[in-house]
């Protein structure tokens, strides 16, 4: 059979998806295969048993999707999408929480494999504020995160088995990235507060702009910083190239390492909690992240005028 315009399933291209080819092959083989099965029952039973065993293996592999890594204390069941670091000691280790496989791929290439681990998150996680304990415990992304960290939601104040010294939220510098970061911070604040209280939670600050001048490259984290750099290079404006980063996945691994992951050149923002204002903080989180939109509307109406006009998109 010759197929003029073959169409394939997935990237591996090991299976045709042309329906017309499938129908022709089935029409030729179906009757003869059924006759063979009916006339050779012993081989038919062996074939069925083989297919059953393979199906069970696929189901188990799909349900498990976990890898093992030795630690000094025990072997932990970890989510399969976690690219773990090689060192077993917690000191100096970092877990980067990134949005999606695109950014996760670049981060895995840019990381220091000895001390830096990568956990890609599938889109926006569940908003835990106002969600039931059952709904939170059944959420796959939150379950994967807790397994990677070595903590349990039913023991929020026990982080003695925390597997990383720093947990770094690394999202795109856009509205969706800010929303994902907010959801993650709300998760840690409401369900795992000890991680914030003991100073383990950080936010990466990837640059917004790349400014190229001759063989020199500058990165700016804000419009103000960009303008400051441009003023320094004002004598040669015609030779300056400015590019705006749309997301972490757009950076090549070397850029991501230099700007966001290398401990010598990156910028991190630590998430802290003032325990003396805990009651007010909890109320603010409930109002802004809860299910009642009226509280958010009132907050925006009250505070919008205090924002600089240049910050309003």
Image (spheres, rainbow, N blue to C red):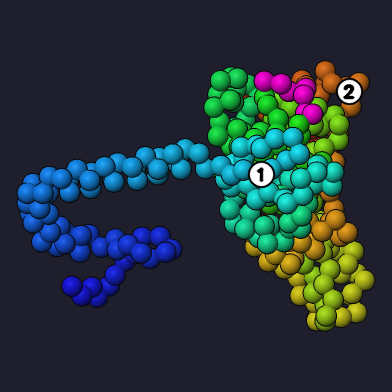
Label 2 close to label 1 by CB (< 8 Å): no
Give the image quarter of residue 20. Answer: bottom left
- Magenta segment: 154-160
Residue under circle 2?
275
Residue 156 among magenta residues: yes
Q: Secondary structure at mark 2?
A: helix
Q: On screen, 298 above or below 122?
A: above
SS for tag 1? strand
Q: Residue at x 20, y 75 (%)?
A: 2
**Residue found 15% across the figure and 45% down from its top:** 42
Front tag of 2 and 1: 1
293 to the left or right of 48:
right
Tell me the distance, in whole angstroms, between the alpha carbons under discs 2 and 1.
Answer: 36 Å
Q: Which mark is residue 69?
A: 1
The residue sitting at the front extreme is 42
Where on the picture, by quarter, is residue 290?
Answer: top right
| Closer-to-camera residue (283/6) | 6
The spot of residue 197 in percent (x, y) is 85, 29
Name the image quarter holding the N terminus.
bottom left
Specify the quadrant of the image occupied by residue 284.
top right
Q: Nearer the viewer, residue 18 or 40?
A: 40
Q: Is 58 positioned to the left or the right of 274 in the image?
A: left
Where residue 155 appears, x then y in whole percent? 71, 21
Residue 302 visible in the displayed image: no
| Residue 272 among those drawn in magenta | no
Could you say where residue 8 lies in the image, as x and y percent from the top left? Answer: 34, 64
Residue 22 tag number: none
Query: Is residue 19 visible in this depiction of the protein?
Result: yes
- What residue is drawn where x is 76% and y is 58%? 112
């Amino acid at each position: 059979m010759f197929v003029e315009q073959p169409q394939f399933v997935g990237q591996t291209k090991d299976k045709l998806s042309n329906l017309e080819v499938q129908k022709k092959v089935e029409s030729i083989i179906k009757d003869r295969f059924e006759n063979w099965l009916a006339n050779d029952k012993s081989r038919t039973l062996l074939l069925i048993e083989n297919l059953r065993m393979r199906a069970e293996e696929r189901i188990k592999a799909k349900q498990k999707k976990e890898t093992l890594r030795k630690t000094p204390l025990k072997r932990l069941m970890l989510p399969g999408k976690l690219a773990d670091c090689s060192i077993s000691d917690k000191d100096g280790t970092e877990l980067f929480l990134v949005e999606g496989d695109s950014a996760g791929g670049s981060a895995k290439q840019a990381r220091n494999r000895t001390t830096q681990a990568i956990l890609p998150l599938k889109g926006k996680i569940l908003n835990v504020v106002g969600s039931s304990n059952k709904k939170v415990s059944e959420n796959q992304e939150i379950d994967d995160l807790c397994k990677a960290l070595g903590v349990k939601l039913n023991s929020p104040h026990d982080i003695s088995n925390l597997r990383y010294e720093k947990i770094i939220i690394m999202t795109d510098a856009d509205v969706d990235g800010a929303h994902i970061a907010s959801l993650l911070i709300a998760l840690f604040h409401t369900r795992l507060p000890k991680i914030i209280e003991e100073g383990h939670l950080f936010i990466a600050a990837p640059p917004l702009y790349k400014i190229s001048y001759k063989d020199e490259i500058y990165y700016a984290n804000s419009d103000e910083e960009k303008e400051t750099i441009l003023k320094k290079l004002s004598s040669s404006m015609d030779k300056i190239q400015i590019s705006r980063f749309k997301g972490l996945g757009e950076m090549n691994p070397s850029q991501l390492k230099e700007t966001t992951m290398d401990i010598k050149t990156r910028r991190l923002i630590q998430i802290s909690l003032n325990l003396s204002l805990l009651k007010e903080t909890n109320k603010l989180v409930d109002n802004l992240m809860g299910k009642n939109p009226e509280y958010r509307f009132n907050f925006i109406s009250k505070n919008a005028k205090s924002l600089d006009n240049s910050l309003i998109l």
